[in-house]
Image (cartoon, rainbow, N blue to C red):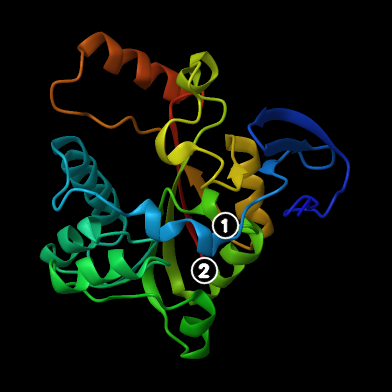
């Protein structure tokens, strides 16, 4: 399948790069970089969660604590939906902090782990199903999820409609214009591989996607995670890069 731009339907594009059979292009209309020939989702996501650890690493645990602190400063309690919850590590921490939580994911095995091992509410429910049930959430999180969607604008519109009035949406996504990405010769290691990702954001295209989806009060959060044992000089470089939206991740918060 060779598709047009998921954000503006423009068919003209420029080749960004080839990675095996994957063709990654940049839209001539809106500048969004996306995977032009994505494989079917059902082929990949059960494998995505195979052989993962039964508990988060020290690094991920630290990141989860910092993500939760960011939420608590905006909305200290409420009903939280974690989209692409995976094994549920973030949800478990949020539940311990007093949030009522629900997680959804396409992987049945990841959802089963979250539900049966971490004892958090999780399901393979779709956004459309939640909308049909007229569910409403005070806060919705997408930690490295938006880049997996075939049509991020359309999905964000659904997410906005799942928020209660004044509710918050938190998004974190990989940054195509990060210094680390641009210098790396192994750009696609791990989950960043285009087998899994459909859209490759920079700060301008992510902001525009959120605007087109109807969100308001869109704010980039220039945060660089503090990781235990991380080299101090490296931390300072990351913090400086984040000022210019050139760190590894892009972090945003917006309201309905």
x and y percent of residue 158 in the render?
A: 57, 72
Q: Label 1: few (<14), some or many (≥20) within 10 Å?
A: some
x and y percent of residue 99 in the render?
A: 20, 69
Residue 204 makes an appearance in the image: yes
Q: Nearer the viewer, residue 46 or 88?
A: 46
- Residue at the image position 24 percent from the left and 76 percent from the top: 121
Q: Is residue 116 above or below residue 181?
A: below
Q: Secondary structure at mark 2?
A: helix
User: Can you identify the residue that label 1 sits on?
Assistant: 149
The reply, left or right, for residue 154 in relation to residue 250 is right
User: Can you identify the residue that label 2 sits on?
Assistant: 159
Q: Is residue 256 above or below residue 200?
A: below
x and y percent of residue 67 in the render?
A: 27, 47
- Residue at the image position 17 percent from the left and 46 percent from the top: 56
The reply, left or right, for residue 207 in relation to residue 83 is right
The reply, left or right, for residue 177 in relation to residue 9 is left
Instruction: Say whether disc 2 or disc 1 marks the residue closer to the N-terminus.
Output: 1
Q: Nearer the viewer, residue 15 or 158?
A: 15
Q: CA distance from mark 2 to mark 1?
A: 12 Å
Residue 77 makes an appearance in the image: no
Q: Nearer the viewer, residue 197 or 166?
A: 197
């Amino acid at each position: 399948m060779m598709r047009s731009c998921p954000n503006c339907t423009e068919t003209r594009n420029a080749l960004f790069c080839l990675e095996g059979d994957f063709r990654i292009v940049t839209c001539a209309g809106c500048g969004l970089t996306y995977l032009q020939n994505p494989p079917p989702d059902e082929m990949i996501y059960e494998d995505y969660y195979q052989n993962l650890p039964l508990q988060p690493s020290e690094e991920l645990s630290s990141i989860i604590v910092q993500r939760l602190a960011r939420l608590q400063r905006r909305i200290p309690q409420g009903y939280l939906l974690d989209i692409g919850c995976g094994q549920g590590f973030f949800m478990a921490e949020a539940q311990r902090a007093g949030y009522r939580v629900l997680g959804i994911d396409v992987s049945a095995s990841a959802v089963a782990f979250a539900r049966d091992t971490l004892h958090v509410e999780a399901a393979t429910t779709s956004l459309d199903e939640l909308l049909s049930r007229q569910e409403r959430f005070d806060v919705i999180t997408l930690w490295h999820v938006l880049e997996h969607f075939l049509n991020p604008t359309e999905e964000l519109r659904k997410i906005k409609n799942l928020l209660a009035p004044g509710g918050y949406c938190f998004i974190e996504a990989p940054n195509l214009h990060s210094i680390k990405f641009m210098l790396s010769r192994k750009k696609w290691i791990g989950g960043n591989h285009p087998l899994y990702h459909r859209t490759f954001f920079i700060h301008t295209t992510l902001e525009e996607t959120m605007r087109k989806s109807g969100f308001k009060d869109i704010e980039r959060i220039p945060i660089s995670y503090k990781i235990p044992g991380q080299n101090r000089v490296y931390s300072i470089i990351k913090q400086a890069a984040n000022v210019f939206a050139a760190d590894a991740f892009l972090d945003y918060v917006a309201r309905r």
